Amino acid sequence: MRNPQSPKNNTHLTNSLIGGLKESNSRLNRSGKARIRHWAPKVKTGCMTCRIRRVKCDETKPVCQRCSSTGRKCDGYNSVPPGPPTTVLSVVQMPSYWEVVSSNPVETESFRFFHSVTIPTLAGFFDQGRWARRLLQMSHRYPALWHAMTAVACIHRDFIANSTPITMSRMQDSSQVRLALQQWNKSIQSLQELLSGQVLTKFDRLVILSVCILFITMSSLQGRLWQAFVHINSGLKLIHQWKLADKGEDQRDEDSDLDVLLVLFTQLDSQARPYLPSLSNNLQWTDKQIILSSSTNPFKSLLEACVALEVHFNKMMQIYTNNSIYIDGLDAGMQIKRQQCLLGLTEWDARLDKYLGRTPQPENGKALKLLYVRRRLAQVALSMDLTEGELAHDDFVEDYAYMLRLMGDILGDPMDPLDSQPADIDQSQNMSFHLETITTEPLFLIALRCREPTIRRQAIRLLRQYPRREGICEGMAALKIAERVMEIEEECLSSPENACARGNWICENHRVTWLQFFLVHDRQARTVVHTREDLLHGQPGREIVTTYW
């Protein structure tokens, strides 16, 4: 049996991780010049951290900018040396890559932008300091991580500073994009070195998966879905190959770091599922599922609860993105999987209740609300009577209203999200990016499946008012599809009475039953929507073409 850490297998992993980047790399110029390390005087009056590192301190108090800008802990200006570092710091506070590249002002400035601006968009509700502290520290020992961070900073800056209206497709060429490509190429070269000829430590693996997440972030920010799919698939295969979901009961810092990665990769896998029927043959998408250790113990944190919930949610998505169920219904195997998902969610409820019994006021109220929304979405999908078709959703109107209220709370919407006639609010229409799945996907599903007109229109309003890209889910594309589906379905309101069938608000025959998603090219997708009437009469569906901003 081949050793998964062998140099030969590491080379295979390298090819898997960087396979989608060859075209971008070929456009880069390489100077080939070695970096020059500048001499700096010894520091005797600075903070203890800078004195130990023998670098010049700016002596800003209470913490110096030299430490805070690089994610280090500033130990102040006491004369007593600090105690021994923690396990994580002992790994990363050896001779630092920062000391090699700090003479490059462009890279340094981009890294600081990543630290101060980009990290909050990546961290999400369940991060627990991973991006803000530990990964920044680790980047000083891993050039692949350092350059991936600076590349993402450049693309993110271009994303938030771009003045193109969100109703138009933006240009993809700027000085920031060109700088990002150079940094991306350096990250790939360093990743190849890391994966060639050495046994990978646990920290090495965390760094590799983190670089993979940063590559996905870059691809998503640029709207390059195919590249994002390649990296998602590569990361999932590494998680399964390294058996990283198999953890014991004792949680350490690196275990919480891994939990954050498991949440992100599982959410991204769920977002990619609708596209897989048209992509799987080319991508060879992994069919393996993340299986967590069985436990009835209460969750130790909301992050642990989130990991378990996203695994159940992903299993549910794998059932309901199987095209055959929309034509032939659930077979016996699918029914068994659905019952297993329901049982898993019931066990999840019990573990969360035990956690909340011990922690009545969790660390983040919005995080808990987001868990409730994801849990309710899965419950609705798994509990409905599929023999009723789309009419089954009418039995869950109260559930959709409940989720919509929670979405309004998470977004901080200033008005009652269930107002039937909301007044126009002067709201900035700038697109924002978040790596974690938060509101776009739930609002899209509410607008798509709930036919009660007030709830549906409020979900669409929130999509329009808070334009977001979350993971690879494009909010404006979701908005366009939801509005078009509502328009198609409401044709029955002006149709001859004998053309309609039973159903509240929207008749059964006019309801959109099946959506197919296709990539036209990197920044454009095609969605084909089929009503029940289309399927009954063998009619082609109607197409919706959406372009990523």
Image: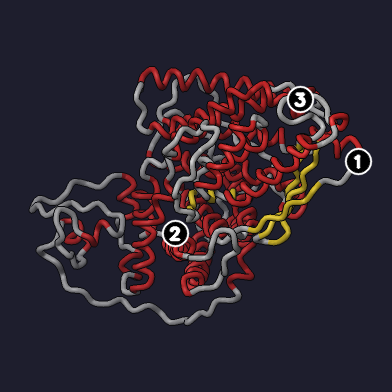
In depth, the one of 309 and 83 nearer the eye is 309
Tell me how far mark 2 sits from mark 1, CA to CA. Answer: 52 Å
Residue 206: horizontal and vertical position, in percent?
47, 49
Quarter of the image for residue 166 reads: bottom right
Number of the label disc, if any, that sits on residue 538: 1
Q: Dot 3: what SS?
A: loop
Q: Amino acid at mark 1?
A: Gly
As measured in the structure, the alpha-carbon distance from the residue carrying label 2 to the one carrying label 3 is 54 Å
The circle on residue 145 is 2
Of badges 2 and 3, nearer the viewer stands 3
In the image, residue 109 lies at what x, y percent?
34, 68
SS category of the residue bearing label 1: loop
Amino acid at pointer 2: Leu
Secondary structure beneath label 2? helix
Q: Residue furthest right?
A: 537
Q: Is residue 101 placed above or below 156 in the rendered structure?
A: below
